[in-house]
Image: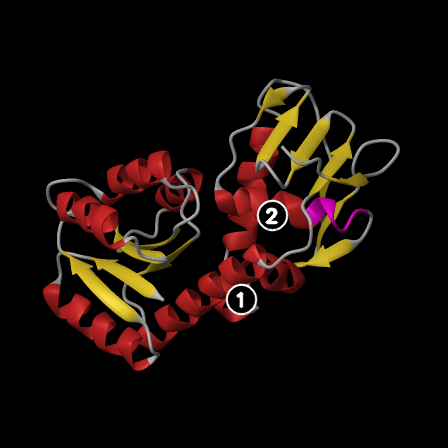
């Protein structure tokens, strides 16, 4: 698989290039935002390791432009910022994961492997399904979510999280189970990913002002997707 590493710190890029090539990945590089987009269009990588603080075009701008043209390429954000609002912004724009500096190359490699493993397993999934509970509809075939027939714009990770919840209705899922099922991580690597994404997902499901208390926090345990009255219905998606 081919990876694009984008950072203006050339020493760090060199280190990551070495660590990733040792794992058998092909690596291409870019050192600013404009070069990142040019390299992305030319090389078509499977995953982008993207720093937030870049010259010429900021990492958030690059991420936004990537998602306008490709919803499927995986993106792992690098950030020296640990502010929750910055992390949430990256996830909202469609990043699959983030890692804050300083980090160990071994940890970054583990995250890359997990993201790519999820990508491969998703492509090998059985026939896509449509999940429905109340006025919430998730269609795997079209990668769409609607509430009361209005589209809800979720990041790829938020979509995976909602699908995981809807595939396990009425069951309390621990943070560890969610990390493994959605991100492929253990708790030590995952950090606050679950909490941040659940928070974003709740807000988006209720963005029209209607109360949809379908995701409940179970203190000290995890989360319960109870769905609306009548539970969650699943049927095979119709060919389009």
Estimate how packed mark 1 is, as few (under 14), some (14 to 19) or many (20 or more) residues with alpha carbons within 10 Å: many
Quadrant in which residue 146 is drawn: top right
- Identified at 57% across, 38% down, the residue is 143
On the image, the x and y values in percent for residue 166 come to: 72, 44
Q: Quadrant of the N terminus?
A: bottom left
On the image, the x and y values in percent for residue 52 come to: 25, 48
Quadrant in which residue 31 is drawn: bottom left
Rendered view: 5 above or below 201: below
Single out the residue that lies furthest toward the front.
239
Main SS class of the magenta portion in the image: loop
On the image, the x and y values in percent for residue 232 come to: 81, 39
Please tell me the numbered disc located at residue 161.
Answer: 2
Single out the residue that lies furthest toward the bottom.
22
* Alpha-carbon span between mark 2 and mark 1: 13 Å
Residue closer to the observer: 84 or 55: 55
On the image, the x and y values in percent for residue 80 come to: 26, 55
- Identified at 63% across, 64% down, the residue is 176
- Magenta segment boundaries in residue numbering: 165-169
- Identified at 88% across, 33% down, the residue is 230
Mark 1 lies on a secondary structure that is loop
Q: Earlier in the sequence, mark 2 or mark 1?
A: 2
Residue that numbered label 1 is attached to: 185
Residue closer to the observer: 174 or 8: 8
Q: Is residue 99 left or right of residue 235?
A: left
Quadrant in which residue 5 is drawn: bottom left
């Amino acid at each position: 698989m081919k990876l694009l590493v984008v950072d203006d710190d050339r020493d760090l890029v060199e280190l990551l290039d070495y660590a990733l090539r040792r794992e058998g990945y092909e690596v291409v590089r870019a050192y600013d935002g404009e070069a990142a987009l040019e390299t992305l269009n030319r090389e078509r990588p499977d995953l982008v390791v993207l720093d937030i603080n870049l010259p010429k075009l900021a990492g958030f701008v690059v991420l936004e432009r990537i998602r306008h043209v490709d919803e499927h390429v995986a993106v792992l954000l690098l950030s020296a910022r640990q502010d929750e609002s910055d992390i949430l912004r990256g996830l909202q724009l469609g990043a699959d994961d983030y890692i804050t500096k300083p980090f160990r190359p071994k940890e970054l490699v583990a995250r890359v492997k997990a993201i790519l493993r999820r990508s491969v397993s998703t492509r090998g999934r059985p026939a896509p399904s449509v999940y429905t509970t109340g006025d919430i509809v998730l269609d795997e075939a079209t990668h769409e979510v609607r509430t009361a027939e209005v589209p809800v714009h979720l990041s790829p990770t938020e979509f995976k999280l909602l699908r995981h919840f809807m595939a396990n209705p009425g069951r309390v899922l621990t943070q560890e189970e969610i990390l493994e099922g959605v991100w492929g991580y253990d708790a030590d690597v995952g950090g606050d990913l679950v909490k941040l994404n659940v928070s974003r997902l709740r807000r988006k499901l209720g963005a029209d002002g209607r109360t949809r208390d379908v995701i409940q926090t179970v203190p000290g345990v995890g989360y319960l997707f109870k769905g609306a009255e009548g539970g969650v219905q699943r049927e095979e998606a119709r060919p389009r």
